[in-house]
Image (tube, rainbow, N blue to C red):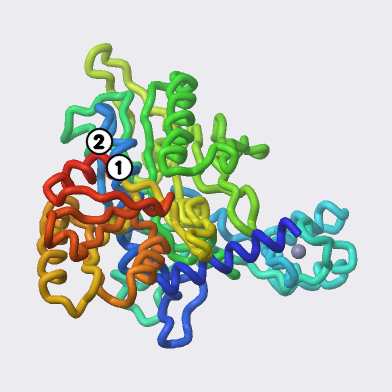
Amino acid sequence: MENDNRDNKMEKIVSLCKRRGFVYQGSEIYGGMAGLYDFGPYGTELLFNIKASWWNANVNTREDYVKIDSAIFKDPRVWEASGHIGSFSDPLAECKKCNTRIRVDKELAKIGEKADEKMSEEELNKVFDANRDRIVCPKCGKKDFSVARAFNLLVKSNLGDFTNDNNNPTYLPGEASQGIYLNFKNVIDTTRMRVPFGIAQIGKAFRNEISPRSFLFRTRELEQADTQYFVRPNENKEAYERIKKDRFDWYLSLGIKEENLRFKQHENLVFYASDAWDIEYNYPSLGFDEVEGIHDRTDYDLTQHSKHSGTDLSYTDPYTGEKYIPWILETSMGIGRVFLAVISEAYDEDELGGEKRTVLRLPSHLAPVKVAVFPLLKNKPELVAKAREVYGMLKKEFGAVEFDDNGNIGKRYRRQDEIGTPACVTVDFDTLEGDTVTIRNRDSGEQERLPVNELVKYFRSLLG
Ligand SMILES: [Zn+2]
């Protein structure tokens, strides 16, 4: 029962996102392309506000972080050094029932069948086929898998390769954070940043997912917001705890309830990592799953790039002369997942004045529209003129202000409720007499009357 409700909520959110111009299926007029989404007018505003909040919390309010914005395309050797070219080539099969992917070689090894990554796909599938009745989906318990395929998630391109067969592919980033490692030395050489300090970036990443799913949760093109904090070797623990707390608190500032967030420690660490935690959100239909990873990566990244590039990425302490490869504490979040978490959390249905409504209870700093201004009737020029005047005044002050004269007032309120607008202002005949307007609050539905010349002050306080 619980699960039915949750699935239902996800469907409602997808539908609201489409209906109100938050998120559209990518290439929709051509039938849509799986795992790709376009953000519409309100979605783009919400996305922008989430990013602004992230920049603010991680960089603008701190002394020890700077921003960069690196090119999408990088020297192909970057992906050798990062391990993406080697380690993403696992023989995978997918459960046809629940889409869970398994490492076929590992599953075969578990039941004592000899299989390894050096086998061809054909050889491996032969062993796999002979043992299909013994391999069970770890998630749903079914035994109905696709064929096994060696699969690399990196997306290839022919940028800079002028042969016809693309012998020397460049790759789209498998993760955005590599740009930070590549520019560590540049930042040290050209700014006054000294270890410990952090570099933050928002960038795109691409993954050739076999089965993108769950709306914005698993997509083929994604945007990531990353910070990499550089510390002296072994001086990682205190900074790591500080970063974990800061990142968790940021989600609370987005209006996400603590009960829908949790930390989960990684059980299996990659060999170089010292510690790794995820922040998980309780998504509709998925339950708790990752929204952000916080990783203690030791000196792995800068050591790898020193080796593969031949450029020494060690750091010399300007005071002590000590030379070392800094350790890195990483935070990496998928912005689409945050977007989904924020909308899921804000989504609500209630009854107002005997009528059912859908409302997005977004915190005002995230709301795509801050205030909407209506003339009571659209066919009364004096009301429209006055409403335009109030609209102009508020728009100049708050930017994201909307004017709407379409349909009856109740319908306009419901439309603004669905996109999360914190308050609406209505200009009526009393406005023409006494220069006061009605302000209607999104969450309570309550209305109050205020002089026009007090509106800016009122909304400055309401919107923070
Ligand atoms: Zn399954």
Q: Dot 1: within a 10 Å radius of its alpha carbon, few (fewer than 14), some, or many (20 or more) residues?
A: some
Residue at 46% across / 19% down in the picture?
Answer: 238
The picture places residue 122, in percent across and down from the top left corner, at 72, 74
Check if mark 2's residue and mark 1's residue have beta carbons within 8 Å: yes
The dot on residue 55 is: 1
- Height in image: 333 above or below 165? above
Please provide percent x and percent y for residue 255.
45, 43
Residue at 18% x, 28% y is 192
Vertical comparison of 448 with 193: above or below: below
Circle 1 SS class: helix
Task: Say whether residue 16 is left or right of residue 3.
Answer: left
Q: Earlier in the sequence, mark 2 or mark 1?
A: 1
Residue 305: percent from the left, percent from the top?
38, 42
- Residue 24 falls in which quadrant of the image? bottom left
Q: Considering the numbered disc 2 on the image, is that residue within a helix, a strand or a loop? A: helix
- Residue reaching furthest bottom? 30
Q: Dot 2 corresponds to which residue?
A: 60
